Each structure stands twice: as C-alpha cells, then as structure tokens.
Amino acid sequence: MENKRPYRMGARAAAVAATRARIVEAAVALWTRRWYDDVTLQHIADEAGVSVQTIVNHFDGKDGVTDAAAEWLAGQVADARQAPVGQVAEIVTVLFDDYERRGDANVLWIAQADRVPAIARALGQARDRHRAWLAEVFADRLPAPGPARAHALTLHYAATDVYLWKLWRRDLGLPRPDAERAMCDLLTAIDPRRKNDE
C-alpha cells in the first residue's frame, strides 16, 4: 500500500498539470484570434475539453487563466529566441521567426491593454523580458551601465518592436527578406560603437 501511494500522488500531479496545460493552451489558441472579451470561460472549457468548474478550480477565473497564459507564452518566446550575441542578421532572423508566428496576436493583445488589466500586466512583463533579451543579445555593443546604456537600449527596443514588424510586414506588405534587411540596417545605424569610431 505504501509503495502505491507515491505513484498515485505522482500520477495525480501529472494529471493536474496536464489539465492545466490543456486549459492554458486552449485559452492561448482562442486569444490569438479573438478579442479577450469575446472569449468566455465556456469557450475555453469547450476548447480544452473540460468543464467551466474545472477552470475555476484551477485558476479561480478568467484573470487567473490570463496570467497563466502569459507565463506559458513567455516560456515559449524564451525558448524560441535563442540567438548568438552580436550577430545582427541572426538576431533579426530569430526575432522575425517569433513575430511571424505570434506578432499578429501580440498586436491584438496590445490593442486591448488599456481596458483589460490582466493583459496590461502581461504586456508589462513581456516588455521587461524583451528589454532584458536585447541587453543579452547586444551585450557586445552596449555601453556600461548608466544613462548611455539606457538610451542605447531604448533605441534597440524601438528598432525591434513588434509594431515595426507590423508596419513593414502587414501595413506596407514588405516581403520578409526586405523587412529583415530594414531592421538590420536600423540596428547597424544605432550601434553605439559607430559613434566612437567617428
């Protein structure tokens, strides 16, 4: 009996984790194509193949699902954005891979941040992570900590923002290679080391 109990507890924990994952992935799938307010707990339950009560038991409600979805997406983005330090073309390709996959959903969420506190929280965290990622992949060119570094990071953020991707790819209809080249040109132009060489 004692040997079976840890197994049962382990199996139960695995089942709970699998149910939570199904709910979160269902919510993400719905919110990548629909407005936040248009997705109800019933929609998420139907998509995940669970009851609304199961969602409430796991996440308390829609805000809890949103926070969990944002955390899950952060992990997906971190896994996808592995790029070598200082290799501008490769960094841009990795970023575009992510934006081509999730950029439209990002823009949809940004449009709702002013009226949905859970989305505003998620976007604030995502912005912090993007800035930290930029500090990591452009570590070779950034000045020492201080105002100059903060300014350089702000420029790099602007040059890699999802809205710039949207402008080039969606609004102007640029082919991906042309949009990537434009971003590379911007990142090259704002390299702080260029000023030191002039």
Image (tube, grey):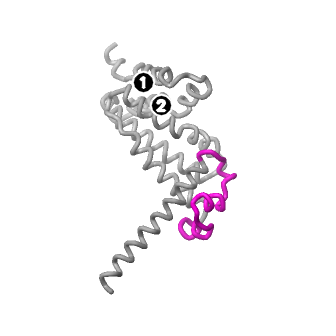
Viewer-closest of 170 and 11: 11
Viewer-closest of 80 and 139: 80
The residue that mark 2 highlights is 160
Residue 29 shown left or right of residue 143 in the figure: right
Q: Position of residue 173 (x, y in %)?
A: 59, 24
Q: Secondary structure at mark 1?
A: helix
Q: Residue at x 54, y 60 (%)?
A: 23
Viewer-closest of 8 and 158: 8
Query: Does residue 51 lie above or below 131 as drawn?
Result: below
Q: Position of residue 166 (x, y in %)?
A: 57, 30
Asked if residue 57 is among those painted magenta in the image, a careful observer would answer yes
Q: Secondary structure at mark 2?
A: helix
Q: Residue at x 44, y 40 (%)?
A: 130
Badge 2 amino acid: Thr
Residue 184 shown left or right of residue 37 in the figure: left
Q: Residue at x 39, y 29 (%)?
A: 148
Q: CA distance from mark 2 to mark 1?
A: 8 Å
- Crowding at dot 2, Cα within 10 Å, few <14 / some 14-19 / many 20+, comes out as some
Quadrant (top left/top right/bottom left/bottom right) for the N terminus: bottom left
Is mark 2 in CB contact (under 8 Å) with mark 1? yes
- What's the magenta bit mostly, secondary-structure-wise? helix
Badge 1 amino acid: Leu
Asked if residue 193 is among those painted magenta in the image, a careful observer would answer no
Tell me the magenta residue range.
32-60
The residue that mark 1 highlights is 187
Q: Position of residue 73 (x, y in %)?
A: 48, 49
Q: Residue at x 61, y 68 (%)?
A: 51
